[in-house]
Structures are given as C-alpha cells and as structure tokens.
Image: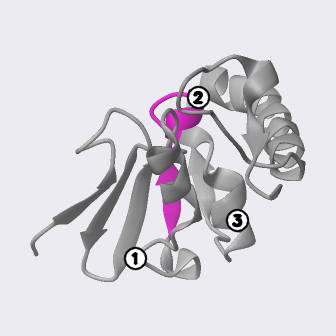
Amino acid sequence: MSVNITFLGGADTVTGSKYLVQQGDQRVLVDCGLFQGYKQLRLRNWDPPPFQASDIDAVLLTHAHLDHSGYLPLLCQQGFKGRVHATPGTRDLCAILLPDSGHIQEEDAALPTVTASPNTARPDRFTPNWMP
C-alpha cells in the first residue's frame, strides 16, 4: 500500500508547517502550525484546509513553536477529535503557548486593521482602514 504526503505549509515558506500523511483510510497530520509573518501569509490561516478535520485520525507535533502547533485550536473547532502525539516537553510548552497565543489572537481580532501612509511608517500616522 502506498503512502501519500501532501504539503500544506512549510514548503513554499518556512511557516505554517502542516503535512498530511495518508495510507489507505488512515490520515495523520504531522504538525499543525499557524502561518506567521507578513499579512499575506497570516491570511492563509483563515483559508479552510483541503480536508475535513473530522477525517484526521491523529496529529503528530514535532515541537511546540506556534508555526508547528498554533493551528490546533482551529483544527479542534473544525471537528478534529483524534489524539495529539508529542513529547512531554512539547506537550508542556503547548499548554503554555496555545492559550497565550489564543488570547493574543483574540485581542488582535478586536483591533481595527491599520495601513501605513505611503510616505511614512510612524505609528502615529497610521490610518485605520474603516475611517474615511
């Protein structure tokens, strides 16, 4: 039986690590990371994954960095019910990082989006997109 690996992140960029490994009807997601950095990368976090979260049997985390583990809460929200496999150290760090990251993401979502004026990047000259 053949194994199929689909690169869903971490291939065309160094962030958002997610690899779907399939053999027969078994599906394991190796890493479950957030895209970080430039806005065009971060926006990819809102794209629906090309699979049903409920079809994933397990997640294997290589380490706790958010670009490898930060998508886990969204995956669970989308219906993932399987087990997450990680070393004890990765598990312990995720217990700290994921709630903190979620809190920061909630705060960021509450802020208006800002764009810089073309002639300066001084914060006091930023204009929220929603203002005329």
Tell me the residue that label 3 is attached to: 76
Vertical relation: 55 (above or below) 124: below
Q: Where is residue 14 shown, x and y percent of the image?
A: 33, 32
Kindly identify the residue that appears in the image at 52 percent across and 44 percent down: 39
The quarter holding residue 100 reads top right
Look at the picture and state if 123 lies above or below 21. Answer: above
Task: Give amino acid for label 1.
Answer: Pro
Q: Amino acid at mark 3?
A: Cys
- Helix, strand or loop at mark 1: loop
Q: Image height check: is 32 above or below 88? A: below
Left or right: 35 with respect to 50?
right
Which span of residues is magenta-colored? Answer: 57-68
Please give the residue where the numbered disc 1 appears in the rendered image. 50
Coordinates of residue 19 in the picture (x, y in percent): 33, 54
Label 3–label 2 contact, CB within 8 A = no
Taking 10 as reference, is 68 left or right? right
Q: Residue at x 51, y 28 (%)?
A: 63
